[in-house]
Amino acid sequence: MKTSFDDSGIPVLTDVIHQTDTPAVVPQATTSPEQQWQQWQHEIRENVLQHLLGKITPGLAEQVEEHVSVAVMQLSDQITQQIKVGLEEALRETVSRAVAEEMGKVKL
């Protein structure tokens, strides 16, 4: 007994197949080897930084905070001193100018 097989649904090389679904992977624009290398460098750098950030211990974070706090206090002291010096100079100049104006009025 011979069974017949309907092969009309099987495409052959000359048939055109129309794809209706969007491909799962969108082809990327071609990049130069230099651009690919830079992308890899960026990805590796980011991965290493993320890995290291995850390993910072609370003790290390506390030490960094203390050092930053000391540095901020020193800078604020320096800025305060500079402001004081500037105000003193401005006050001396203003008083000298006012005294000179009054002396000029008295001479007249």
Image: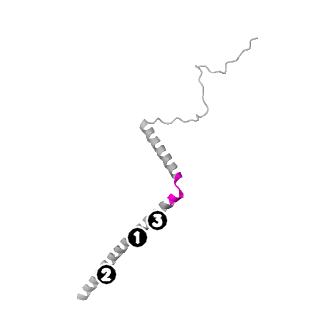
Q: Which residue is drawn at 48% across and 62% down?
A: 65
Look at the numbered disc 3 and give the secondary structure of its residue. helix
User: Looking at the rendered structure, which numbered label has been put on residue 20?
Assistant: none
Q: Quadrant of residue 3?
A: top right
Mark 2: amino acid: Val
Q: Which of marks 2 and 1 is in front?
A: 1
Q: Residue at x 50, y 50 (%)?
A: 52
Magenta region includes residue 68: no
Give the mark nearer the N terminus: 3 vs 2.
3
Residue stretch in magenta? 54-61
Image coordinates of residue 79 in percent, x first then y, are 39, 69
Give the mark nearer the N terminus: 3 vs 1.
3
User: Looking at the rendered structure, which numbered label has been put on residue 77?
Assistant: 1
Point out the image quarter for the N terminus: top right
> Can you see residue 100?
yes
Q: Quick check: marks 3 and 2 in contact, CB under 8 Å?
A: no
| Predominant secondary structure, magenta span | helix
Residue that mark 2 sits on: 95
Q: Distance between the residues labelled 3 and 2?
A: 39 Å
Point out the image quarter for the C terminus: bottom left
Mark 1: amino acid: Asp
Q: In the image, is 73 to the left or to the right of 18?
A: left
